[in-house]
Amino acid sequence: MMADGAALRCYPDTLETRLGFDVVREALRAHARSALGAEAVAQLRPLRDLAAVRAELARVEELQQALRFDDPVPLEHLIDLRPWLAQAAPEGARLEGEALEAVRRVLVTIRLLARYFQERRQKYPALAALAERLTPLPELERQLAAVVDEEGQVRDDASPELRRLRRRLAQQRQRLRETLLEALQEAIRQGYATEAQPTLRNGRMVIPVRAEARRKVPGFVHDTSASGQTVYIEPASCLELNNAVRELELAEQREIDRILREATGWLRPHLSALEASLDVLGHFDLLQAKVHLAELLEAHVPEVANDGIIDLKGARNPVLVLHFRRLRETTGQVREVVPLDLSLGRTYRTLIITGPNAGGKTVAMKTVGLLVLMLACGLPIPADPASHVSLFDQLLIDIGDEQSVEADLSTFSAHMTHMAYMLAHADERTLVLIDEAGTGTDPDEGAALAQAILETLTRRGARTIATTHHGALKVFAYETEGVENGSMQFDQTTLRPTYRFQPGVPGSSYAFEIARRMGIPEPVLVRAQTLVGRQQVALEALVRTLEQRTQELETRLAVLAEEQARLERLQREYREQRERLETETEAIRQRALEEAEQLLQEANARIERTIREIKEAQAEREATRAAREALERFRRRVREQRRKARPQPSGSEEPRPTLAVGDQVVLDEGGTPAEVLALKDDEALIAVGSLKMRVPVSRLRRLNRTARRAHQRAAASTSLPALQARTRIDVRGYRVDEALQAVERLIDEAVAGGLREVEVLHGKGTGALRQAIRTYLQGRSDVARFEDAPWEQGGPGVTRIWLK
């Protein structure tokens, strides 16, 4: 149930079984949740339309993402309603309550599924387009929910009449039960009945009475027990009540019948929409089955094209994957499928695979055909996603899985029938698979026929894979443009197949070696080699030598790959160690900064405490000025000591060269080292430790390597506070004295940290706070100048301060 598209032509009719697609289809059917999905699996056909196949694969990938990582996809209640819809079509038809409840549940799924993908249209566009074909019917859903409950029973409130009837029926049944119990208790007291409860016989409520006392209890006998010892009597006192109950029950059934027929009529205008939505639900069920099968096979979507090129990487035969999985689940035996790397269609159109029997030639060829067929059905394949697989218009095969006891003419005739069809229909858009080319007849004639057929297919541009044991075809592949040899690797030491494909190298049949291993006498083998001929023996020896050298080369490549992996691991470990050391270094630096900040806070606290003591003592202005001058002398000594600790610029700093982003510079002569982050006009954005600031380019000097190292050493011991010094404070809302103290701390920290520029955000307001701060700044000897910030940075609401 894929998008419309031209079907892939497959020959013969048994192709699916020959390739093993019937096993894949059955595994897919097992993951369908409903009859709708199972039918979609049965109707699944391979397509040759590239757009249709890509669209289906996109839907599979999107649903896989949704099922893995998103909210649950509402795929419950995928019920096949089609038999009930057909039953509801005639006018006056009636569906039972269970059927109407099933319709309601499907309507809920339709509504929720349509909304789910509508809300995720950007995330899952392919599935959203499919969900648009659903037709939600919320009004019909509401109507049905008002008639039947979740058990499919007609609700009491389905109609006012039904509610009235059921209420009266409950009352009458209660009266009848009470009357029956009275009659039963009286019969028990008289010894006519045993301890029991009233029961129902022939639609009437009755009491059990001993057979011998049947005439002692007035009433009507409706039944007798199997033993004949008990009769079931409707007491005469209950006759009218039983009649009333029966009449009410019949009235109830008539009303239920009317309600169900009316509700069935509600469906009739929507039958076409419901059937179309069921098709879409079946498609969604098919898609989720594809997702689960892909996970089971560890399958991926490769690059799909129409260019006639097949380039499989790490491909595994799905039939073998499923078989080995069942084997592991049932016996615990663990076996892995040997991956296949095979290319066809780039530099050669025909591939001839040779090698020993049971070496994997046919499996490799069938794997190619099966994976092409799966992709044409919109199924991910068990191969590396870097694989490239072309679609074809035709898939033609001649694979005889069943071995015949007699290699008679009929077998050869069957092969020739297939060859005739291929030669009549094959073109450049055809994939041809031929197993045991040239078999079933005289070896020389069979090889000649096979070569002529392969030559014709190659000239027509068909992509062809053929397996054979004929040595002549190995030579043909070697000498013919567009044809290539390939073989299945064979361990010459153990004489066992490895099932690995080797491109470009013909394979030996290893007939003599296998015969020797199986116990054929040596004289017989010697005689056989003599009969084969010296040239054939030499050819086989050459093939074996090529195989051996190829295996040696692959071994060396494996060693190199292992060494490369080891080097990559060492590089990774080195990077991890370096990152760990950098992290530890950063942690040490942060601790040092925190300690420096704490020391700075303690110093500021001491200064504030001194000023507060002076104020509390109401010292004279002269004493206060003397204290400030003493603090200022202390700051100058700190700056002087810091300046002496920094490297001297003479001979080490270049005289105002052109700066570039990333340059190491020093801010002002003898100032703090920094890094240039950005340049614009005559202004630079620099980083001083973890702080960033904009300064004129004229205040920067680029450091050479020697000066840079000196600054780094000096910075390690003297500039930690600079990294923590603030460059901006916000004093809006402060009283004047609080604001001045905050400005004082800002400037003290900046001077101690070696900064040259700070900002104070005071706001515009009445201007009183701004004026007080500027009056204070005029009295600071370490303030070079101050001015309003640019308009885009706050204008008159921010004062920029440059320090000496």
Image (spheres, rainbow, N blue to C red):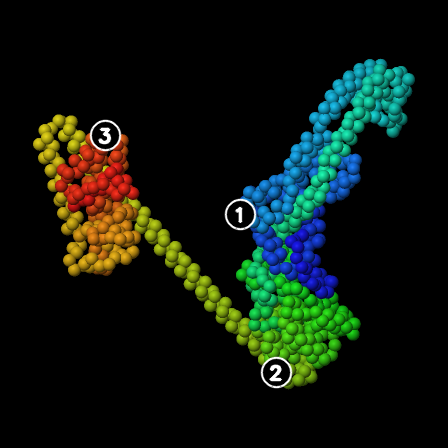
Residue picked out by circle 2: 538
Residue picked out by circle 3: 735
Q: Amino acid at mark 2?
A: Ala
Q: In the image, which disc is placed on residue 122?
A: 1
Look at discs 2 and 3 and give the one toward the viewer: 3
Q: Amino acid at mark 1?
A: Gln
Q: In the figure, 296 relative to 511: above or below? A: above
Residue beneath the point at 79% across and 72% down: 410
Element under disc 1: loop
Element under disc 3: loop
Q: In the figure, 501 relative to 620: above or below? A: below
The foreground one among 185 and 590 is 590
Residue beneath the point at 78% across and 31% down: 257
CB within 8 Å, label 1 to label 2? no
Residue beneath the point at 63% across and 52% down: 290
Instruction: Specify whether 799 is left or right of 539.
Output: left
Instruction: Specify whether 700 is left or right of 301.
Output: left
